[in-house]
Every structure is written in structure tokens, then in C-alpha cells.
Image (spheres, rainbow, N blue to C red):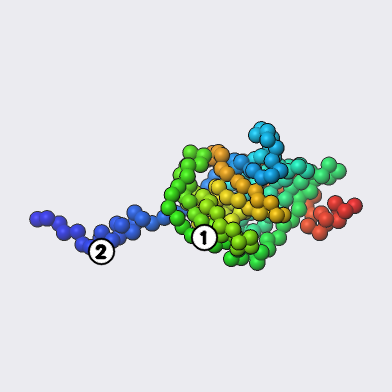
């Protein structure tokens, strides 16, 4: 006797196959190439790169600026973050407070066809409109890694891996160059004992003096 497959069963199979991949926790290192008008032509210059470390609920972003290296660390569920800077005369960990209204509804997203291979992985295309600057761009994201491991493009359905941000009137582009899934030492997400925790207001006063 031939078994009859019900239409409902076929629909369930189609839904399962077409459902998006669920984002899971990620542990490892991501390296982004950073490009802007201020870039040094020398590709080996550290200012041309940003390094991201992620471990479950912890995030660390190493950025290299003309005034030195900055380390951003964040406990994602607690939404507690600090910026570590070596000012020469002292090392500080500046408490940061998230402005929940600043980027609320700033970005609009429209899914589109196509993918781009970045760091050996297929990243989905998506049209992103930055309403603050009335600009629409095609960006890319990895749907298998949560967007929580990035502080850019709030609302992206996965980890942004090819995107642009406007900072002080200048567009800065970020493009994933390498990804390493590996175990990381939890200590790299902590504040070293020789760093003094201060508020943003205290940091501003310190710079003034």
C-alpha cells in the first residue's frame, strides 16, 4: 500500500527548510578592515583595522585611533560597558551609559537577494537606510552569529560584516577580513587592576586639566 503524504506534512517540511538559521552564542575573534578619508595608505598600519573578541555574553572591541588604542568591553546581558584608555599619566576605564533613544528606529531594513563571500563565509545582502542621513546602502550580515556581538547598525538581523557608519560627518566603512572560532581567556574581557574606573564627566575634567 502506498503511503499518502498529507499536504499539511509537506507544508511543515517547507517551513522547516525555509526557516532562518537560529543565531547562537559565538566564541572567537573577528578582524575588520576599516576605511575612511583618514586612512593611512599603508595596509599594515593598525589604524586600518578593528579587532572584535566575543565569548558568550562578553564583548571586547580593540580600535586603533590617531591618539592611541582604545578597548571597549561590555557585559551584554547587564548592558554594562567601559572604554579602556592609557593616557600616559594614568590608565582609565571610562563607564559608558547607553542612550536608548539615540538610535531607536534610526535604521530601516529591507531584505534583498544575493550574498557576498566575506572571510570565507557567505554573508546575506540587505538594504539599510540610515534615516538620520537619508542614505540607503547595501550591507551584509552573517545570520548564524548574533548581532549582539557588534555595537553598529542596531536592528540588523545578524552580525554586521560589511557596513558603513557616519561619524562626525565622515563615512567609515567596516569589512570583515578574518574570523576565528576558538576558545578565549575570560580575563581579556575584564578591567586590569592598574586601571582606574571613572565616569565620563570625570574623564572630561581629566582631559581639561
Indicate left or right for 90 with 182 as reference. Answer: right
Residue 86 visible here: yes
Q: Residue, x 72% and y 57% (percent of image)? A: 96
- Residue 20 placement: quadrant: bottom left
Task: Note whether 40 is above or below 25 in the view shown.
Answer: above
Q: Name the secondary structure under disc 2.
A: helix
Residue located 46% across and 57% down the image:
111
Image vertical order of residue 165 relative to residue 122, above or below = below
The residue lying at 12 percent from left, 55 percent from top is 2
Q: Which residue is mark 1?
A: 109
Q: Residue furthest right?
A: 209
Residue 11 shown left or right of residue 128 in the figure:
left
Instruction: Give residue 202's quadrant in the image.
Output: bottom right
User: What percent of the width, then of the height, locates residue 163?
Assistant: 57, 50
**C-alpha span from label 1 to label 2:** 32 Å
Q: Where's residue 81, x and y in %?
A: 68, 54
Q: Residues within 10 Å of mark 2 (few under 14, many from 20)?
A: few
Task: Provide residue 129's location: percent of width, then percent of height.
Answer: 56, 59
**Where is the N terminus found, in terms of image quarters?**
bottom left
**How packed is label 1: few (under 14 Cα within 10 Å), some, or many (20 or more)?**
some
Look at mark 2 in the image and give the residue it sits on.
8
- Label 2 near label 1: C-beta < 8 Å? no
- The residue that appears at 48% across and 47% down in the rendered structure is 123
- SS of the residue at dot 1? strand
Amino acid at each position: 500500500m502506498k503511503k499518502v503524504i498529507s499536504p499539511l506534512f509537506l507544508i511543515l517540511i517547507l517551513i522547516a527548510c525555509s526557516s532562518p538559521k537560529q543565531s547562537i552564542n559565538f566564541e572567537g575573534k573577528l578582524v575588520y578592515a576599516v576605511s575612511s578619508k583618514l586612512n593611512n595608505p599603508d595596509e599594515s598600519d593598525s589604524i586600518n583595522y578593528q579587532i572584535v573578541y566575543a565569548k558568550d555574553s562578553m564583548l571586547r572591541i580593540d580600535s586603533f585611533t590617531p591618539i592611541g588604542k582604545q578597548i571597549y568591553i561590555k557585559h551584554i546581558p547587564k548592558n554594562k560597558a567601559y572604554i579602556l584608555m592609557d593616557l600616559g599619566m594614568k590608565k582609565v576605564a571610562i563607564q559608558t551609559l547607553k542612550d536608548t533613544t539615540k538610535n531607536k528606529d534610526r535604521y530601516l531594513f529591507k531584505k534583498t537577494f544575493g550574498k557576498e563571500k566575506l572571510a570565507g563565509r557567505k554573508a546575506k545582502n540587505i538594504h539599510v537606510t540610515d534615516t538620520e542621513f537619508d542614505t540607503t546602502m547595501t550591507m551584509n550580515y552573517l545570520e548564524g552569529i548574533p548581532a549582539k556581538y557588534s555595537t553598529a547598525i542596531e536592528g540588523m538581523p545578524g552580525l554586521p560584516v560589511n557596513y558603513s557608519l557616519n561619524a562626525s560627518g565622515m563615512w567609515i566603512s567596516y569589512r570583515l577580513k578574518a574570523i576565528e572560532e576558538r576558545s578565549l581567556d575570560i580575563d581579556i574581557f575584564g578591567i586590569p587592576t592598574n586601571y582606574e574606573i571613572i565616569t565620563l564627566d570625570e574623564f572630561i575634567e581629566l582631559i581639561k586639566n
